[in-house]
Image (spheres, helix red, strand yellow):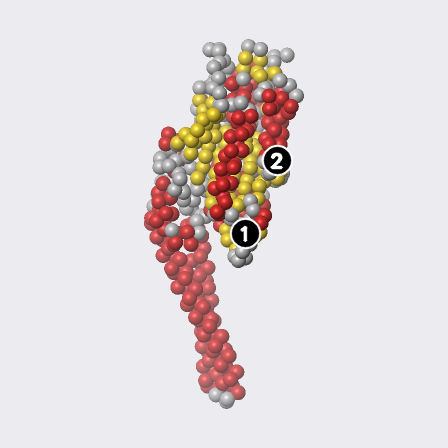
Amino acid sequence: MLTLKQITDNYDNVLKGLEKKHFQGAKETLDEVIRLNELRRSTQLQKDNAAAEMNKTSKMIGQLMKQGQKEEAEAAKQRTGQLKESIKQLDDQLTETEQHITNILLTVPNAACEAVPEGRDAADNVVERQGGKMVTLAEDALPHWELAKKYHLIDFDLGVKISGAGFPVYTGKGARLQRALINFFLDQAAAAGYREVQPPTVVNQASGLGTGQLPDKEGQMYHCELDDLYLIPTAEVPVTNIYRDVILEEKDLPVKNCAYTQCFRREAGSYGKDVRGLNRLHEFSKIEIVRIDKPEHSYESLKEMIQHVEGLLIKLELPYRILRLCGGDMSFTSSICFDFEVYSEAQKRWLEVSSTSNFESYQANRLHCRYRRADDKKIELCHTLNGSALALPRIVAALLENNQTPEGIHIPKALQPYTGFEWITED
């Protein structure tokens, strides 16, 4: 969440960043936080003054008794009792005010940074660049759900039988292609210096709050109510929470982790043609890269992460584009976000396969993720970043569709050592 220092020291920039995200009532909310913070500071001052007076008065009691001034000593005792009660009331008021501030800040999104373009929705996103070679398919080219059926790669109906819509069953070479992509992405991440971790796929409420999925997205997460645990929507949640309540040393930054997990999303409200096949699932595989960095280096880290994701798409020989998201299309927690999309020639549409974001100190403040500076030993908030590298479903969709030929589906050269086959055919 936003820090009080950010709001008080950079009020105009924070307000502009929230308005860029179209956060309703941004000014009123910030003003209320400032008002409550002034009340908190005033209450703290009263408490500190009362505590100082009580300590001073307590020390006087013994001296007065020694001097035989019993009435004055008794009056001092009564005063310390009054001050003690006053301190308790002020402490309760302080706790209530601090909790009120926190409750408000939990509902306030991260402010968009200056580099984020203005805009309300996806139509206002800015194309940074495109790459890869667009393909031309025959007029009878099939979408991936038809290819999956033809080559016995994915059984959507069986998934409905077992779990419901949005839970496909991968079979044969479809399952091997999934495994090949997972290993390829993990090996590429390792080569780029990311340490692989294998985290849980369920998290507690504190973890969801730490990365900002709660309380903003609880309706999109699967909730195991009996145990009050949540199925993760992305490995970002458990991997970033490794560093909750941790103080890192500056020399150890940036921390670079990657993880493969299954991801679970309710996708409430999704319907229509755009959810066919692998386009939108409730359960899917994804490799996530996560960085913890110091503020002055985090945008260099973001640049490196974008280059890493772009390199994966180049090696997969897929046509792609990189979008700089406008304020209105960004997530609750990100300060800036770049989406990667691959082009599906059979569907004639772009498919999102990665979001790579810098959250600056927003998640770190929730997580109490900090680092100790080497020069003056001062402890400050880290910056957190994450990106999909990559999400598998739409990558699989694009690979199947864009590489279909009369002879079968051709596997990109970089993947062949992982699949063990060059072609998917009907045999």
Residue 287 coordinates in the image, percent (x, y)? 57, 33
Closest to the observer, 364 or 37: 364
Residue lying at the far bottom of the rendered structure: 68
Q: Residue at x 61, y 12 (%)?
A: 426
Q: Quadrant of residue 163?
A: top right
Image mark for residue 190 = 2
- Mark 2 surroundings: few (<14), some (14-19) or many (≥20) residues within 10 A: some
Residue 146 coordinates in the image, percent (x, y)? 53, 16
Disc 1 secondary structure class: strand
Q: Residue at x 56, y 18 (%)?
A: 148
Residue 366 coordinates in the image, percent (x, y)? 49, 49
Relative to 369, residue 310 above or below? above
Residue that badge 1 annotates: 371
Q: Residue at x 39, y 35 (%)?
A: 326
Alpha-carbon span between mark 1 and mark 2: 24 Å
Q: Is residue 150 visible?
A: yes
Q: Residue at x 61, y 16 (%)?
A: 423
Residue type of the residue flagged with mark 2: Ala
Residue type of the residue flagged with mark 1: Tyr
